Image: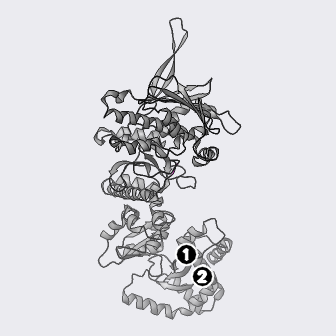
């Protein structure tokens, strides 16, 4: 028996390997199975140029064994095996990759999907094992050898009696502590779960004995053991498209993403180029319960050569497409030493850009060909698309604006901005919109009535962030967005504008006196033609509208904002004569009552609260009692 030290600063480096590089101890099984898969690949590719090996690919396998009594977990393969020298070099030298050397020295292996890169995955075993025994026989040697280490005091190598080629790794699990339960790795369901999660698409079968209980003629239980294959082997995204049924995709989606409803849309693509990848993506039919919370984690599953690298790679999805579920598999991505994170961001950026373009194309297709389905999608996820425009300060509007839907004043149907433009009146240079809590409330706004009467279509905005998005976008197809409640919305003819201007000038003293009664609440009072039957309304002046004021003040902050508003009075309403009479008679007390009531009415119509509802109630009762 040879007792040797690691060919590196063993204890310090190995401690770093075990405690720093890997963040999740359960990945040790992924690493050991990946190494076993590489060993099977090597022997198979060697057999392609060496007929004497007589290797049949269907006979190659990985086997898992559990011994609860001895507290051992064993991983076996019938692959290429290692000689004494290879055991010493590959396992005794940290960060030396036998797989990389194999690829460098074998021409026939250049197209192999060898998983190992860094020669460190094996040492993840020491996260769960206090002692590791590796027994191996190389196809190039008549002798077999046993390598053993506790991971701290070097390692020993001695001859063994293993007859068949391949490698057997026995992990003697650590003792349980108050914080850590290592016994979980002695449970069949734990092993099955980890293989299903990380190694489901390893090319070779991963086998384990499954206990079966049967009863004989005398009704006594008889235990038997049958081989069970734990992995699927062939990823659904690598099967021929025409051979995969829609039901298979739905089952895969339900199994991997725990959704009880089938996805709204499934799409799969293969991209070749600087960074080649395959993607399988799903648009859910409903938003998860936590979708609009901080707890929700976006991201796609990331596979490299069929091995799960990351459960949720957030860099693959922009926030506005965070609802998409699915996976990406690429052989070209560069992983860091732990295979848990990524080395080169530009590769992920290339993949992410391709994914983004694919999602956009699919959504556009759904909008065009499956309108009902798209409207269902937009109901759940439309807000996220709007966020994409708003959070990018409008930089992403070209990518997302044609995916937005708004309810139209005509027929109350959802339409796109492009459809609004197609319906525009001749020489119309403005896209009109109105905001409110519901369609019905918007429809009842006094400002809406006249705009509709003049034949203009109005977009009804009911989402709390809708107006913020349009403010950021500013325009669409060279047409400006304009709130019907904005002071700049004026559909009068030039003659009507001149007549209104003259009327406001003639009543300026009346309006100045009325404004004194409502003080800082309004920036002005004036006549308007924008109202048909209603007496009053509030119009916004400046960048913050009344609706934006409501949204911003509903946020949990101490800072409150106030929209600058103008109290507009319908010049053709009979209330005007009453106001003029009171002013001419210098009955300022009564004029104040009417002014405050009219202002309160205007606030209520806009859905704003009253600062002193008791005062307004009393004033109304006084006026009614006369």
Q: Report which residue position mark 2 lands on.
A: 595
Q: Of helix, strand and loop, which one carries label 2?
A: helix
Q: Residue 60 in the image: x percent, y percent?
A: 40, 29
In the foreground, 497 or 473:
473
From what the image shows, is residue 387 above or below residue 68?
below
Q: Residue 227 colored magenta?
A: no
Residue 57 image-quadrant placement: top left
Q: Residue at x 32, y 27 (%)?
A: 52
Location of the C terminus by quadrant is bottom right
- Give the colour scheme of this rendering: one colour
Q: Report which residue position mark 1 lands on.
A: 602
Q: Of helix, strand and loop, which one carries label 1?
A: helix
Q: Residue at x 42, y 57 (%)?
A: 347
First-in-chain label (2 vs 1)? 2
Whether residue 621 sits left or right of residue 279 in the image: it is: right
Please give the range of residues in magenta.
333-341
Location of the N terminus by quadrant is top right
In the foreground, 53 or 547:
53
Q: Residue 175 in the image: x percent, y percent?
A: 67, 33
In the foreground, 50 or 583:
50
Which circle, 2 or 1, is nearer the viewer?
1
Residue 153 image-quadrant placement: top right
From what the image shows, is residue 536 above or below residue 249?
below
Whether residue 445 sits left or right of residue 455 in the image: it is: right
Residue 398 image-quadrant placement: bottom left
């Amino acid at each position: 028996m040879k007792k040797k030290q690691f060919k590196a600063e063993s204890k310090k480096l190995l401690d770093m390997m075990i405690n720093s590089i890997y963040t999740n101890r359960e990945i040790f099984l992924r690493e050991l199975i990946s190494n076993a898969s590489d060993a099977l690949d090597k022997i198979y590719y060697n057999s392609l140029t060496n007929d004497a090996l007589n290797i049949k690919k269907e006979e190659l396998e990985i086997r898992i064994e559990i011994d609860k009594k001895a507290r051992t977990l064993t991983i076996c393969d019938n692959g290429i095996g290692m000689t004494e020298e290879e055991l010493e070099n590959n396992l005794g030298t940290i960060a030396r990759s036998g797989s990389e050397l194999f690829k460098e020295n074998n021409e026939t292996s250049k197209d192999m999907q060898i998983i190992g890169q860094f020669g460190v995955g094996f040492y993840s075993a020491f996260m769960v094992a206090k002692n590791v025994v590796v027994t191996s026989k190389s196809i190039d040697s008549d002798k077999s050898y046993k390598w053993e280490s506790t991971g701290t005091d070097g390692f020993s190598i001695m001859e063994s009696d293993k007859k068949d080629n391949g490698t057997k790794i026995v992990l003697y699990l650590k003792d349980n502590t108050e914080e850590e339960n290592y016994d979980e790795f002695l449970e069949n369901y734990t092993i099955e779960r980890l293989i299903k999660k990380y190694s489901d698409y390893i090319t070779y079968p991963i086998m384990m004995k499954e206990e079966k209980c049967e009863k004989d003629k005398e009704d006594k239980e008889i235990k038997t053991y049958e081989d069970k294959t734990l992995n699927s082997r062939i990823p659904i995204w690598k099967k021929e498209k025409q051979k995969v049924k829609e039901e298979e995709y739905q089952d895969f989606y339900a199994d991997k993403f725990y959704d009880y409803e089938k996805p709204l849309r499934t799409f799969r693509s293969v991209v070749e180029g600087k960074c080649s990848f395959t993607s399988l993506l799903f648009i859910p039919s409903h938003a998860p319960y936590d979708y609009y919370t901080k707890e929700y984690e976006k991201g796609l599953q990331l596979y490299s050569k069929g091995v799960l690298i990351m459960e949720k790679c957030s860099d693959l999805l922009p926030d506005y497409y965070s609802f998409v579920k699915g996976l990406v598999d690429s052989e070209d991505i560069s992983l860091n030493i732990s295979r848990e994170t990524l080395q080169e961001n530009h590769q992920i950026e290339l993949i992410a850009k391709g994914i983004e373009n694919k999602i956009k194309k699919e959504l556009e297709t759904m909008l065009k060909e499956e309108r009902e389905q798209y409207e269902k999608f937009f109901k759940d996820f439309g807000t996220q698309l709007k966020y994409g425009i708003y959070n990018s300060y409008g930089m992403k509007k070209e990518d997302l604006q044609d995916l937005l839907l708004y309810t139209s004043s005509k027929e109350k149907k959802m339409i796109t901005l492009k459809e609004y433009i197609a319906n525009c009146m001749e020489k119309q240079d403005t896209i009109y919109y109105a905001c409110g809590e519901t369609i019905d409330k918007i429809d009842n706004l006094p400002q809406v009535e006249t705009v509709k009467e003049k034949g203009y279509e109005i977009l009804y905005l009911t989402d709390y962030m809708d107006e913020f998005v349009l403010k950021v976008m500013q325009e669409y197809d060279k047409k400006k967005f304009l709130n019907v409640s904005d002071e700049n919305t004026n559909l009068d003819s030039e003659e009507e504008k001149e007549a209104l201007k003259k009327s406001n000038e003639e009543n300026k003293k009346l309006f100045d006196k009325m404004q004194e009664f409502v003080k800082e609440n309004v920036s002005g009072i004036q006549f308007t033609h924008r109202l048909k039957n209603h007496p009053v309304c509030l119009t916004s002046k400046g960048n913050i509208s009344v609706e934006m004021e409501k949204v911003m003040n509903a946020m949990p902050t101490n800072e409150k904002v106030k929209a600058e508003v103008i109290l507009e009075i319908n010049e053709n309403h009979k209330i005007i004569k009453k106001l003029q009479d009171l002013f001419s008679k210098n009955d300022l007390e009564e004029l104040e009552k009417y002014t405050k009531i009219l202002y309160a009415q205007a606030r209520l119509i806009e859905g704003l609260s009253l600062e002193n509802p008791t005062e307004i109630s009393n004033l109304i009762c006084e006026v009614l009692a006369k």
